[in-house]
Amino acid sequence: MITKPTMQHFASDNYAGICPEALAALLAANAGHVRSYGDDQWTLRAADRLREVFETECDVYFVFNGTAANSLALAALCQSYHSVICHQLAHVETDECGAPEFFSNGAKLLALAGEEGKLTPAVIEEAVTRRSDIHYPKPKVVTLTQASEVGTVYRPDELRAITTTARELGLRVHMDGARFANAVASLGVAPAELTWRAGVDVLCFGGTKMGLPIGEAVVFFDRRLAEDFAYRCKQAGQLASKMRYLSAPWLGILENDSWLRHAAHANAMARQLASGLAKIAGLQTLFPVDANGVFVHLPRVVEQGLRERGWLFYTFIGAGGARLMCGWDTAPETVDRFLDDVRALSALPASS
Ligand SMILES: *Cc1c(COP(=O)(O)O)cnc(C)c1O
């Protein structure tokens, strides 16, 4: 089946292009000779702007992608004999090819179950206290994904409950914020309330999925944890020499809260998609649609029919079912067209 180059899809929010604000800032940064390796005015200003967004003095590093951001941040939080507590659906566990273990020289991920893609204080406490002998990899970090891999979000009170338990157990708190913007837009609270004020030590703030061409920001709220982090980035091949092209787009998207507007739009498209699906007989979303992702079990004839009509989406991510992600540019008409196709295919006699 031929897919038109202009067709929009629900496979991932990283299928979308660059948002206009980020692109304009990228082009504006393409002027003349400037210092390399981050010692340029765009990088310094982008880091300052992030400190304003988070209302605190924090250390900021720009890297190429989320796998590197997560892996290097986790490596900074633990020794090789430590373990990192994560949800069993966490990207660090299922989608990073062992990079967190590799960059931490062997720290072990302890993957735990939890409803709706989220960890709770109880499961964390159980994992930490069940063993305290020398043979067990000593738990040192808990990592939370915000928004989660199944499109739910942690509310500030849920975060505080987890980080309070983490503190009591001697754990550091890392947040995989590949879709942090969608979580902030969904909850309508200050970014600080979902991070350092809620006890988060380090955030990997996703830029790519919210409309940047490339890149994520690693934000250390506990600045002591950032010691030598620049060397980690360099050693891992994550220090961009023309850093301005990673950092300048952040200035564009953070200006006038464009990042939150785009994230709110993506969330709204997901809600529109979910409510449309719910009106089609038998189609139940599998999780609350808090952010920009919808998970749904599609009958086989519908799934195959959608693929034959050119739609791209994943069925292997999360907890089964089709994962439908909306991006900053997802058009309402795309949602309508998809729903029309689902409706038409659902009306066919079921063959499975
Ligand atoms: C997309 C994503 C990342 C980053 O993935 P990269 O492809 O390495 O940039 C990290 N965490 C989550 C939850 C993601 O969805």
Image (cartoon, grey):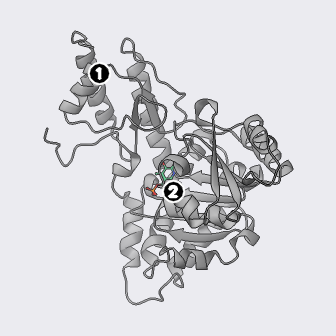
Vertical position of residue 267 compared to residue 69: above or below: above
Mark 1, other Cα within 10 Å: few <14 / some 14–19 / many ≥20:
few
Alpha-carbon distance for marks 1 and 2? 32 Å
Q: Residue 3, how many percent across, how many down?
A: 17, 42
Q: Which residue position is annotated with label 1?
A: 300
- Judge by depth and name the residue closer to the eye, 233 or 61: 233
Residue 2 placement, left or right of 225:
left
Q: Are marks 1 and 2 in contact (CB under 8 Å)?
A: no
Q: Residue 215, how many percent across, how many down?
A: 46, 64
Residue 240 placement, left or right of 3:
right
Mark 2, other Cα within 10 Å: few <14 / some 14–19 / many ≥20:
some
Q: Is residue 167 visible?
A: yes
The quadrant of the rendering that contains the N terminus is top left
Q: Examine the image and state in which quarter residue 231 appears.
A: bottom right
Vertical position of residue 53 compared to residue 263: above or below: below
Q: Which residue position is annotated with label 2?
A: 98
Q: Is residue 70 visible?
A: no
Please name the residue shown 74% across and 41% down the image: 127
- Does ligand 1 reach within 8 Å of label 2's beta carbon? no
Res. 20 mark: none
